[in-house]
Amino acid sequence: MSAPVPVSAVVDLDVAGPTINPHVYGHFAEHLGRCIYEGFYVGEDSDIPNEGGIRLDVVEALKALDIPNLRWPGGCFADEYHWMNGIGPKQDRPRMVNTHWGDVEENNHFGTHEFMALCELLGTEPYVSGNVGSGTVREMSEWVEYLTRRGDSPMARLRKENGREEPWKVKFWGIGNEAWGCGGNMTAEQFAEQARTFATYCRDQDDNRLYRIAAGASDDDYGWTEALMKTVSGLGGKGVEERHGHAPIQAVSFHYYTWTGPTWDQKGSATQFGTDDYYRTMLKAQGMERVLGGHARVMDAYDPDKRIGLVCDEWGTWFDVEPGTNPGFLYQQNTLRDALVASLHFDVFHRFADRLVMTNIAQTVNVLQAVVLTDGADLVLTPTYHVFRMNRRHQGAASLAVHLREDAPARDVDGEQLRTFSASASVRDDVALLSLTNLDAEAPVTLTVDLRGRTVGEPTGEVLTAADLTAHNVPGQATAVEPRALDGVRVEGSTLTVELPPHSFATVQLPLVG
Ligand code: AHR
């Protein structure tokens, strides 16, 4: 092992920044591969313990993460999905072909009622993604009515006929998905106009209040965000249409995936990679800061009071599928490298707490950077899962700035600078939480933090690491990568010292006692 790299920082414990929206820890479940079917839903007749077909081991695992919301039914699938096919008796539901993902049959057995039951079991808020690409304004409007209208109406009656008397509460509503691509191949201006119209007819029924999120840009396509902001902020000449009872759109989104490799068809293996590939992946993950900042700056120009939220409703790693699996199912393993991608992202998200209202990892189970993988009746928690769990106290906490000294470690990766140490912090209920990532593949870090403004008690910490960056969990070896207590964390006076192993993620909790 190389010699420890010294890193020093300052944290003002008494200078609370903007609150980290709990929805930054959001999730995503698409009708894609084995995410819904096999992952979340096995059907009532399955031997796998379930409630109404929803597998209970997955629910139990996710409940430990306090997941704040779940986005559904897509993704690209959302713009092919016609919700009326997914209600009523299962045997009568029409079958369709999931042309986007694997060209497989979709029997619509998991539909609106099943999704809402899943959200209730998880104790999480639904985020429904509506179909703009191949749907109609009426279809989307009626879906909102079906879900949320209490009073008498055609859709409320239909819901009651299908066994649900009370309306559900639904806040988060997606207007389309990737409209520049699978969601309709539109121009930004074309979509902005469509989004206004669709959103207008997504009514606030009774006391339900929607938070409408317009499908946004890919990566650093700031022009897309600008076109949307012109329309939704009213500076594009048409005004924010409050006179119809609600402003059409409350947030705009963007997607950012971490993928490397020479071409889209050669993204590289999720488990077999060298140190150079690892650093390249981290450089791409670090790019989230530039991209998020770019979208936030465009929004600031149109909405300086930050009334419109920014949402990143798809993020995560995207590698080649596991050998022998359906290329359309996007099934990939998840190593310590994925965990460090997640911890880097959360640091960035915490730093943008003033604008960022939600993010959603793609995707929760069995697809891309999953937190849970299933294989028949087996289930494993991935390294990424552990980052969500270790970080969960940041949800709803006040962000704290971590000021790194100027000589913080970095290395050259393909001519760009990768910062090899990352940190963020927050405070809630008189406990500060520090998240610390050492990206260096070889060298440990000795971190000293000058804690100012409050007196701290005895610190405790957890660390997630493994001998090898490619380490991952499989049935039979489900704990190859899991957190353990962090040794070598101490406070003397107002100085915190932490020893971080190479390629590791750690959290330190500090009780504030004075
Ligand atoms: O998450 C997988 C896919 O990635 C989604 O369906 C789509 O929105 C994005 O391109």
Image (cartoon, grey):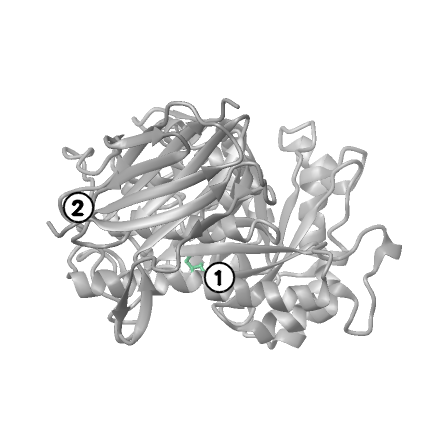
Residue at x 47% of width, y 68% of height = 219
Q: Is residue 99 visible?
A: no
Q: What element carries label 2?
A: loop
Q: Which residue lies furthest to the right in this view?
A: 243
Q: Is residue 326 above or below residue 343?
A: below
- Identify which amino acid the numbered label 2 is placed on: Ala
Quadrant containing ligand 1 reads: bottom left
Q: Tell me, for residue 471, which label it has, or none.
A: 2
Q: In this view, does 388 lie above or below 215?
A: above
Mark 1 crowd level (few <14, some 14–19, many ≥20, 10 Å Cα) = many
Which one is in front in this view, the residue at disc 2 or the one at disc 1? 2
Q: Nearer the viewer, residue 373 or 88?
A: 373
Q: In this view, does 15 lie to the left or right of 393?
A: right
Name the residue beneath numbered marker 1.
255
Numbered label tally: 2
- Looking at mark 1, is its residue's CB closer than 8 Å to ligand 1? yes
- Label located before the other in sequence (2 or 1): 1
Rendered image quadrant of residue 319: bottom left
Residue 205 percent coordinates (x, y): 78, 41
Mark 2 crowd level (few <14, some 14–19, many ≥20, 10 Å Cα) = some
Q: Tell me, for residue 99, which label it has, or none.
A: none
Q: In this view, does 488 lie to the left or right of 508?
A: left
Residue 103 percent coordinates (x, y): 36, 61
Q: Is residue 393 left or right of residue 342?
A: right
Q: Is residue 242 visible?
A: yes
- Identify which amino acid the numbered label 1 is placed on: His
Q: Which of 123 and 275 is in front in this view?
A: 275
Residue at x 72% of width, y 52% of height = 141
